[in-house]
Image (cartoon, helix red, strand yellow):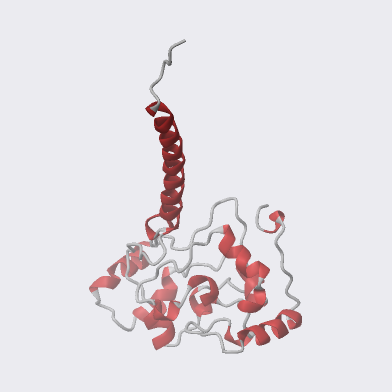
Amino acid sequence: MSQIFHRSTNKLAKASIYGAVFIIVLIGYVSWQVNQSSYFTYVHSPLPQPVPFSHEHHTAQLGIDCRYCHTTVESSWYAGMPPTHTCMSCHSQIWTNAAMLEPVRESYRTDKSILWARVNALPDFVYFNHSIHIHKGIGCTTCHGQIGKMPITWRAHTLYMRWCLNCHNHPERYVRPKKDVFDAVYNPPSDQLAMGRRLVKKYKIKSLTSCDTCHR
């Protein structure tokens, strides 16, 4: 029986197989890169806000404590957003005619909430409790980044599950003294690991990694 296919077909078949594998790997790699990019995660990408609020100015420069605006952070899963009258407790006396603050004044006059764009948002199937982390010595900047250096607020981390698990598996790398939890420009000391191990024991921190810890 005569040969149906030319001998070169063998090389073409091998090339097509290797090519298909290469394309699949390439697609997977590109997808992973896009998934990690700021385009997808919004990391370091400030979102447009109705008022260009500066954490840098209010926390680091003026020394306003995080809890002045985020009043429920120590007692609730939700840190809380300040009502307009919290802003106006200062801005009814200073910068009263600033154009950028007109949305705040309008909200105060009409009693309608300002529609802020949510910067750090988790999926609905994820449960996160601010108060638990605060009371275990996990500071604001651990998750929110150097908030005291942000003239406009942006997301500092992906908030992906593997990022959370990194902290849950190694809490000694991130825990800090409770007196420093609300320090908006906190930097870990050179002996972070040694201090962290002591604080993990002192604060009775457990490495909770079971699914139902966060997925309830």
The x and y percentages for residue 135 are 66, 76
Viewer can see residue 148: yes
Residue at 60% x, 55% y: name it: 126
Please identify the quarter of the rendering in which residue 72 is found. Answer: bottom right
Q: Residue furthest top?
A: 1
The x and y percentages for residue 151 are 35, 76
Residue at 71% x, 54% y: name it: 212
Residue at 71% x, 79% y: name it: 200
The x and y percentages for residue 41 are 43, 58
5 relative to 122 in the view: left or right? left
Residue at 24% x, 77% y: name it: 97
Q: Tag count in the figure?
A: 0
Instruction: Tell me if residue 108 comes above or below residue 185 in the rendering.
Output: above
Q: Depth check: 110 or 21 in front? A: 21
91 relative to 98 in the view: left or right? right
Q: Depth check: 151 or 96 in front? A: 151
Please identify the quarter of the rendering in which residue 38 is found. Answer: bottom left
141 relative to 56 in the view: left or right? right
